[in-house]
Image (tube, rainbow, N blue to C red):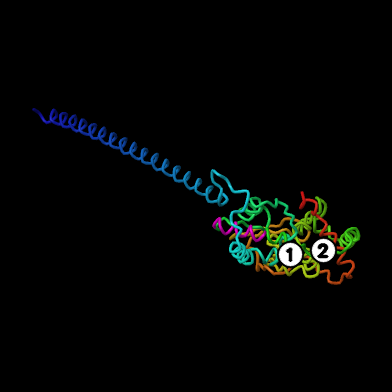
Amino acid sequence: MNIYLMRRIFLIAYCLMSWALALQSQSAMRSQSAMRSQSAMRSQSAMRSQSAMRSQSAMQSQRPAGQSQRGIPETNPYTTAADLEAGRKLYIGRCGHCHGKNGEGGRGAPLNTGRFKHGGGDREIFLVIRNGIPNTEMPGTLNYPELEVWRMVAYVKQLSRQGTPEPATGDPAAGALVYQKNGCASCHTIEGKGGALGPDLSDIGAKRAARHLRESIIEPGADIPLDYRTVEVIGITGKTSSGIHLNEDEYSIHMLDTKGELRSFMKSELKEVKLPRESLMPDYASLSKDDLENLVGYLSSLGQKRRTE
């Protein structure tokens, strides 16, 4: 056998071996790919299952306490003297700073009138305390045991039978003129008319006690709603802008300026950002006693019809 023939045989054998190895490698790769695909599918399925379980768990955790197949009782099952005393302590610690220790109202609505905007039944009050009121400053108590919520219901019901809030003695019609004369509508809205720089006052009488309204007129910086915090930014050039703080992240800050225009600033272009604890609303301590009481009377009348509906 000459050397040429040997080379041919060697080359043919080498090609056959290479082809076999390539087939084996491709088969292994396909097998590994299939295994990875199956593993990924199992992983995705597990993730979807876990996500569904978390979603279901979250929905269950957000469901009002006591809400099961039998539903929430219409009548409070916890109304003993011990329950009322426990409810009083819970109320004072959690609710009294807004609604007043005796339910007389303040930043929150009065609770001693016997009239509740969202219903005065035991079950309705339970749901308000448990879930809060969306788009308001009233938070929920989802992390509270059902027993404690019912005890607060018992105390709120007792407050509702104990008296009435401080009445507004002013003349609402005269107060409306004071409101107009002092340009309040340039910042505040009533029934869709007015500015947006201050809180909407359309139903302020159902939300705030007369005492709180009076204090807010004389000293507006004493209790500033969270949605109306003031921000002041100073640019690199020294230019200052101020308004209502809307949003902020690591790179930018957004405000509604004093002209009612939306403004955005990159923090890299600012020298300083201040959050002064001051209200943009001027104080009206110079109002006469009659004008002040009439203005309080006008504001207290707003939304009172809604409270009783």
- In the figure, 237 relative to 172: above or below? below
Residue 304 lies, in percent from the top left, at: 80, 54
Q: Which mark is residue 42?
A: none
Give the CA separation, mark 2 to mark 1.
11 Å
Question: Would residue 242 be seen by someone viewing this image from the given angle?
Answer: no
The quadrant of the picture occupied by the N terminus is: top left
Q: Is residue 151 magenta?
A: yes
Question: Would residue 115 be seen by someone viewing this image from the given angle?
Answer: yes
Q: Image point 88% across, 59% down: which residue? A: 172
Residue range of the region highlighted in magenta in the rendering = 145-156
User: How crowded is the residue under tag 1: few (<14 C-alpha within 10 Å), some, or many (20+)?
Assistant: many
Element assignment for label 2: loop
Residue 287 lies, in percent from the top left, at: 87, 69
Q: Image point 17% across, 29% down: which residue? A: 8
- Quickly name the residue at label 2: 167
Task: Report the amino acid beneath label 1.
Answer: Glu
Q: Image point 86% across, 72% down: which residue? A: 286
Element assignment for label 1: loop
- Quickly name the residue at label 1: 104
Question: Along the line of sight, which residue is nearer the eye, 247 or 136?
Answer: 136
Please identify the quarter of the rendering in which residue 49 is found.
top left
Task: Report the amino acid beneath label 2.
Answer: Pro
Residue 130 lies, in percent from the top left, at: 60, 54
Residue 202 vs residue 133: left or right?
A: right
Magenta stretch mostly in which secondary structure? helix
Please identify the quarter of the rendering in which residue 222 is found.
bottom right
Please identify the quarter of the rendering in which residue 18 is found.
top left
Question: Along the line of sight, which residue is nearer the eye, 248 or 251?
Answer: 248
